[in-house]
Amino acid sequence: MADTVREIERKYEADSTTRLPDLAGIDRVATVVEQGVEDLDALYYDTPDQRLTAAGITLRRRTGGRDAGWHLKLPAGPGEREEIRAPLSDVPPPELTSLVRARVLDRDLVPAVRLRTRRTVRELRDAAGAPLAEVAVDEVWAWPAGEAEKPGAAGVAGRTEARWREIEVELTGGGERDPGLLDEVERALAAVGVRPAAAPSKLARALEETGLRPARPEDRTAAVASGKGAAATRRKNFGEKESGKKGSARKGSGKKGSGRKGTAGDLVLEYVREQLRVIVELDPAVRRDVPDSVHRMRVATRRLRSAFRSYTKVLDRGVTAPVGGELKWLAAELGVERDREVLTDRLVTAVADVPRTLRLGPVDARLRIWSERHRAESRDRVLAALDGDRYLALLKTLHALLEDPPLRPGAGRPAPEIAARAVLKDYRRLARRVRTALDAPAGQDRDVALHRARKAAKRTRYAAEVARPALGRPAKKFAKRVKRVQQLLGDHQDSVVARGALRELATQAQQAGEGGFTFGLLYGREEARAADRERELPRVWKKASRRKYRAALRP
């Protein structure tokens, strides 16, 4: 069983002359307690092309110290990482390797570098004796895995043993951990000449100093996997970027385009790259059942599929259509879990709003049993999908598509021109579906028509999101208006689904002799809620469909 801890630490350069300042008295630190010396031996694993390193992820097997075992570290924000631990074993444990499957794809994880560390630990405690942080002074030896058995042994040509000294400061105060303490310690260290480490981790420094060069940051596939600065890069590209051969639509960045706006190829490929980054980044979170991770991953798959469908002037639909089909499959697998989450929250809230005098029978227990049964089924389905060959093949296909994009001549056109056309085309499709829904007779036919309109609204909104770096504020405002339509239609569809679940719950309650009065009451409320959304639609649509919002999109 793997355990998870949040690691919040900072690293600093040190040498043989470095001496720690007196840290007692800074912030809440009352005493500094010597914790002795630890000898640590760690073997780091990665793919031969160092995909984990490129993504800021480390996987190691470590002996010695208080936390011997396997450690997988995932980025969790500036200066923070999630450390997932598993017991010692001879090979990387499946519960950890599954969390990096989306990164390594079908590549093997092999030993990359070995580190031995002699660590001298001091614990910072508050006035009550509670631990606040640990300050470790580390003497580190590193060498390529398998090339030497101990520090000082000869390496092969071009690869050397590395040795250095560094300081680590890590918060240890449980739920009370305060990053402000790290700032105070840093100021105290700076006062005696200690500076932050240049390398982000021991592994990064070891790879550099032993001659094992990390994956190049300019490699496109590595950039997709790591996502470092992807969102900022996307904004920057359409303000400053001009790349590729002049006039080459094949690379999507041929002509300079309309001044600062770039080409349609730039625009769409950056969006595709960003959504793939999100999918890969969320994979371990979904596997670990992190709240909202399934929803966010599903949204990324839908955005990606929508981009393929909306921007057919840029990407060859003959190539992207099969990929879109696989994305639809993945979204459906994730949707089982996400739809259950949304439905359960809706029903729990609805039951809580019913006066106790009208809650007849074990309504809460019946709902809980129903939810847990469906949760187990949906959770198994999500994990089976992520562990399957089909998902792995999809990720590989998406990486390959970005490496050699199937661009059409429109990819070399100015981004604003192509983006506006795509958004307005999707808008016209949405308008037709809304009119059809408003004209449909009440009942199932209208429910189906409104659901189709909701999907069209979502596609139009995503097309506008793609266009935003090229079209600016008009695209943002347009997407916001369409989102309101989508949300209203989404609430209507949620009501349709909720009524189906309430019928199921009422039937189960009746069969168990509990009575279904409360579920029937909730069914009636959902009917009224759906009717309210239908009455609101003309007003919301009228605002969203104003001509001025569409006119502002035209370059």
Image (spheres, rainbow, N blue to C red):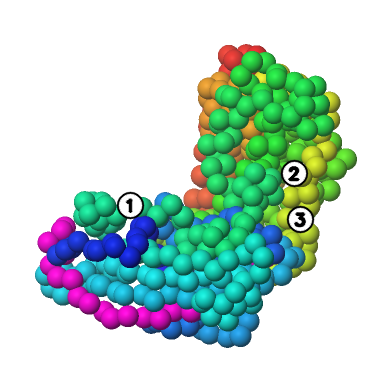
On the image, numbered disc 3 is attached to which residue?
396
Looking at numbered disc 3 in the image, what kind of residue is underneath it?
Lys
Q: SS at mark 2?
A: helix
On the image, numbered disc 1 is attached to which residue?
195
The percent position of residue 505, horizontal first and vertical second, equals: 56, 67
On the image, numbered disc 2 is attached to which residue?
402
Looking at numbered disc 1 in the image, what kind of residue is underneath it?
Arg
Residue 544 visible at all: no
Question: Residue 7 magenta-drawn?
Answer: no
Looking at numbered disc 2 in the image, what kind of residue is underneath it?
Leu
Q: Which one is nearer the viewer's eye here, 383 or 16?
A: 16
Residue 288: quadrant of the picture: bottom right
Vertical placement of 378 versus 230: above or below?
below
Q: SS at mark 1?
A: loop
Q: Earlier in the sequence, mark 3 or mark 1?
A: 1
Residue sitting at 53 percent across and 33 percent down? 484
Give the spatial CA distance, label 2 vs label 1: 40 Å
- Does residue 522 appear to the left or right of 331 in the view shown? left
Q: Earlier in the sequence, mark 2 or mark 1?
A: 1
Question: Residue 35 magenta-drawn?
Answer: yes
Vertical placement of 509 versus 392: above or below?
below
Q: Which residues are magenta?
A: 25-47
Are the residues tagged 3 and 2 within 8 Å (C-beta)? Answer: no
Magenta residues, dominant SS class: strand
Outermost residue on the bottom side: it is 89
The percent position of residue 301, horizontal first and vertical second, equals: 67, 49
Q: Which one is nearer the viewer's eye here, 429 or 520?
A: 429
